[in-house]
Image: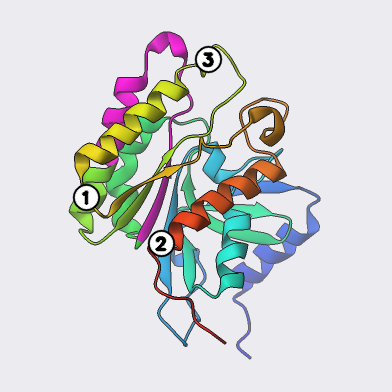
């Protein structure tokens, strides 16, 4: 068995020894574990968004339960990205940027996706604005820019565009229902079979699915988001391998 490099071993020791529920670090592409799946080529997935994608000290990213679902179902999916979100002893890579909005992601999309040209992208962005900014048009324009950039870099990418989860933090996030209507219209206007709308708003009850801040998903919320993503992914993924 090949021994772990000293740096990797030290990282694991530190991660396991600290009593932290979750922490988040930026990792270079070379630091990500190599794909060891020799039975079939892994399909790469990039979670792209804000803290709801990245996770935080008081809540877990939906990517953790989602990865468990796809693994249990036998899909050879590899999660990639410039960030490493760590929950307990588990790590999932992503492009979640805590506190950042859709316009920030649009500015970074080209450089991020050039480094991590995933086969599948989960795009969930729409928070980190105030209702007083009248932000809907700007968010939609930013998402359109992100989609255009990704397709330009990789014409075969499949982009799952989320109608984002609603929030009880009002009036700050009272614009989200209107945003979700316009995101639906955007995907319809793009008329591209590789750009798929995923309704994360449907059935979402912030009183049930968020932590005390009324914004970020609790464990039930992360599970619900993962189930919604997984349902959409199953429609675009090839049949899972059978061991």
> Residue beneath label 2, please?
235
In the image, residue 107 sits, relative to residue 242, either above or below, namely above
> Residue beneath label 1, please?
192
> Residue beneath label 3, please?
172
Q: Residues within 10 Å of mark 3 (few under 14, many from 20)?
A: some
Please report the bounds of the magenta region as a residue range.
120-146
Give the CA separation, mark 3 to mark 2. 34 Å
The reply, left or right, for residue 236 in relation to residue 151 is right
Residues under numbered marks 1 and 2 in contact, where contact means CB atoms less than 8 Å apart: no
Give the CA separation, mark 1 to mark 3. 32 Å
Identify the residue at horizontal 64%, vertical 54% (top origin).
86
- The quadrant of the picture occupied by the N terminus is bottom right
Q: Residues within 10 Å of mark 2 (few under 14, many from 20)?
A: few
Label 3 secondary element: loop
Q: Which is nearer the eye, 175 or 99?
A: 175
Q: Residue furthest bottom?
A: 1
Label 2 secondary element: loop
Identify the residue at horizontal 75%, vertical 47% (top origin).
21
Mark 1 vs mark 3: in front: 1
């Amino acid at each position: 068995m090949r021994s772990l490099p000293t740096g990797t071993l030290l990282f694991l020791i530190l991660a396991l020894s600290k009593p932290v529920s979750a922490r988040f670090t930026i990792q270079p592409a070379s630091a990500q574990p190599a794909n060891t799946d020799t039975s079939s080529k892994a399909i790469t997935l990039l979670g792209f968004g804000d803290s709801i994608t990245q996770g935080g000290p008081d809540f877990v990213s939906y990517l953790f339960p989602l990865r468990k679902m796809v693994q249990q179902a036998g899909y050879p999916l590899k999660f990639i990205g410039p960030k490493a979100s760590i929950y307990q002893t588990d790590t999932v890579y992503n492009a979640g940027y805590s506190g950042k909005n859709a316009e920030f992601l649009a500015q970074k999309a080209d450089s991020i996706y050039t480094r991590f040209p995933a086969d599948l992208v989960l795009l969930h962005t729409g928070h980190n604005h105030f209702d007083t900014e009248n932000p809907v048009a700007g968010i939609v324009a930013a998402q359109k820019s992100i989609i255009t950039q990704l397709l330009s870099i990789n014409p075969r990418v499949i982009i799952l565009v989320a109608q984002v989860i609603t929030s009880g933090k009002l009036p700050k996030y009272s614009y989200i229902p209107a945003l979700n209507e316009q995101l639906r219209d955007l995907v319809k206007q793009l008329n591209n079979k590789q750009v798929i709308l995923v309704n994360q708003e449907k059935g979402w009850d912030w009183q049930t699915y968020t932590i005390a801040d009324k914004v970020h998903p609790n464990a039930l919320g992360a599970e619900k988001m993962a189930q919604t993503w997984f349902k959409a992914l199953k429609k675009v993924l090839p049949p899972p391998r059978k061991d």
